[in-house]
Image (spheres, rainbow, N blue to C red):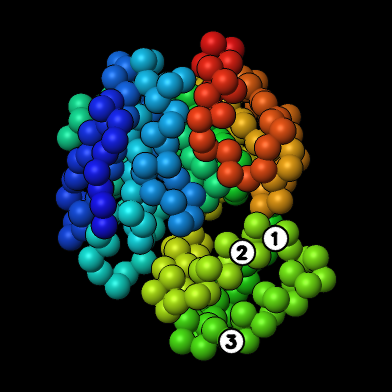
């Protein structure tokens, strides 16, 4: 794997948590800390283009989540909310971070939301970029956990699931970009196992939205919501719902799809941090 960093404002680093090696990038040179969590199938490098809008104000600590990037999750155990809390505490200790902000994109949004009740007293701001976990059912997470464990069948025997995916696409029940993403995931056993382990891990990341809204309001934490109106993975109405219960919120609905984190997001982020 090529871990070469092309941006001179980016530093690659690692920390040890339990038996695991967590890779992260330090992006930017600002005096405020921002911990960033990417989406499924992404890695820390995703956040590098945001240095143009955030790099002078923040140092972004972008983590490679378990099963992603250069992070090495060295046990067969799934990762949990307690693990993510432990990783962030190790990062804070290593980097001398007291107060900080959280940023979550897509799946990283769900993890961010679950972390808020733990760290709300230390938070300055929250950024959700096409973040999941607000209200969208994610029907998968409503299934009995026993049934989900049985779904490991698809790791070794994917053909039935590939055919089912094709039917969903044929009848336009899922959008082509989502179809292409899952088709690629189902392509190899390694990718299927990564997805399965990630799915199971996320069962531990509860997001009680009413409680989260109450805590954010109580501690006067500003929330920045950036969602695409053409997003076919996370509907932008999730952001509208979440924003209604917040006192300090900057909501921006952008003419964009789900893949928001790129250089074009800098304009919206620049508006968010001065709002």
> What whole-number distance in Å separates the C-alpha atoms at marks 1 and 2?
6 Å
- Along the line of sight, which residue is nearer the eye, 22 or 157? 157
| Residue 147: assigned label | none
Q: Check the image and report above or below for 197 versus 59.
A: below
Circle 1 residue: 176
- Mark 3: few/some/many CA within 10 Å (<14, 14-19, 20+): few
Look at the image and tell me in which quarter the N terminus lies. bottom left
Residue 159: which numbered mark, if any? 3
* Residue that carries the numbered disc 2 in the rendered image: 180
Estimate the x, y position of residue 61 in percent, counting from the top left. Answer: 32, 34
Would residue 254 appear left or right of 181 to someone viewing this image? right
Q: Are marks 3 and 2 in contact (CB under 8 Å)?
A: no
Give percent across and percent down for residue 24: 28, 42
**Pointer 2: residues within 10 angstroms few (<14), some, or many (20+)?**
some
- Say which of marks 3 and 2 sits in front: 2
Whether residue 138 can be seen here: no
Who comes first in sequence, dot 3 or dot 2?
3
The quarter in which the C terminus is drawn is top right
249 horizontally vs 31: left or right: right
What is the total number of numbered labels drawn onto the structure image? 3
């Amino acid at each position: 794997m090529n871990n070469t960093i092309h941006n001179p404002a980016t530093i690659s680093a690692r920390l040890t948590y339990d038996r695991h090696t967590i890779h992260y990038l330090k992006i930017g040179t600002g005096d405020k800390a921002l911990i960033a969590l990417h989406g499924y199938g992404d890695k820390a490098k995703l956040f590098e283009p945001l240095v143009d809008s955030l790099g002078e104000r923040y140092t972004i600590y972008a983590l490679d989540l378990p099963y992603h990037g250069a992070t090495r999750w060295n046990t067969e155990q799934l990762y949990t909310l307690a693990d993510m809390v432990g990783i962030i505490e190790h990062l804070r200790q290593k980097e001398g971070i007291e107060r900080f902000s959280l940023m979550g994109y897509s799946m990283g949004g769900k993890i961010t939301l679950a972390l808020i009740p733990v760290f709300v007293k230390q938070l300055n701001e929250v950024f959700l970029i096409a973040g999941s976990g607000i209200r969208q059912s994610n029907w998968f997470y409503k299934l009995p956990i026993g049934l989900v464990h049985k779904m490991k069948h698809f790791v070794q025997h994917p053909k039935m699931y590939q055919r089912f995916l094709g039917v969903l696409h044929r009848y336009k029940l899922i959008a082509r970009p989502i179809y292409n993403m899952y088709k690629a995931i189902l392509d190899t056993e390694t990718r299927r196992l990564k997805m399965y382990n990630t799915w199971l891990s996320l069962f531990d990341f509860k997001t009680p939205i009413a409680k989260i809204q109450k805590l954010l309001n109580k501690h006067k934490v500003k929330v920045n919501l950036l969602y695409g109106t053409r997003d076919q993975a996370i509907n932008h109405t999730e952001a509208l719902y979440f924003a209604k219960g917040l006192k300090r919120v900057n909501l921006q609905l952008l003419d964009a799809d789900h893949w928001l984190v790129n250089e074009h997001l800098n304009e919206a982020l620049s508006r968010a941090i001065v709002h």
